[in-house]
Image (cartoon, rainbow, N blue to C red):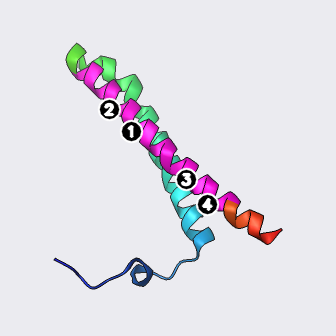
Amino acid sequence: MQTGLSLGTLCAMTRPEAIQQIRDAAKTIALQMMKIHPALPHLQDRETMADSLKALHEMTVNLEIVKKKIGRLDRQDDSTLL
């Protein structure tokens, strides 16, 4: 099912604004994820803790991929200004 919306019509935002919004969201996500780790042992379930730690690690890796891509895009934009 297509809605007929393109990425450009979702909202009017410049690339630098989008980069900053993504950076801010990534920081918030990372800070919230850091709150999960210390709580896991209190669940008193080794399997849940192990699976959760694995999932948190995967989420961290994927978040870092997003941050690296955004950083490259930002540096690419900066280099065109020179």
Q: Nearer the viewer, mark 2 or mark 4?
A: 4
Q: Which residue is mark 2?
A: 55
The residue segment tinted magenta is 48-75
Q: Nearer the viewer, mark 1 or mark 4?
A: 4
Neighbor class of circle 2 (other Cα within 10 Å; few <14, some 14-19, many 20+) is few
Residue found farthest to the left: 1
| Label whose residue precedes the other's in the sequence (3 or 2) | 2
Neighbor class of circle 1 (other Cα within 10 Å; few <14, some 14-19, many 20+) is some
Give the Cα separation between the discs numbered 1 and 3: 16 Å
Left of 75 or right of it: where is 43? Answer: left
Disc 2 and disc 1 in contact, CB within 8 angstroms: yes
Left of 79 or right of it: where is 11? Answer: left
Marking on residue 59? 1
Q: Which residue is mark 4?
A: 73
When the figure is inspected, residue 2 is found, relative to residue 77, above or below; the finding is below
The three-letter amino acid code for the residue at tag 3 is Lys
Quarter assignment of residue 52: top left
Marking on residue 69? 3
| Label whose residue precedes the other's in the sequence (2 or 4) | 2
Give the Cα separation between the discs numbered 2 and 4: 27 Å
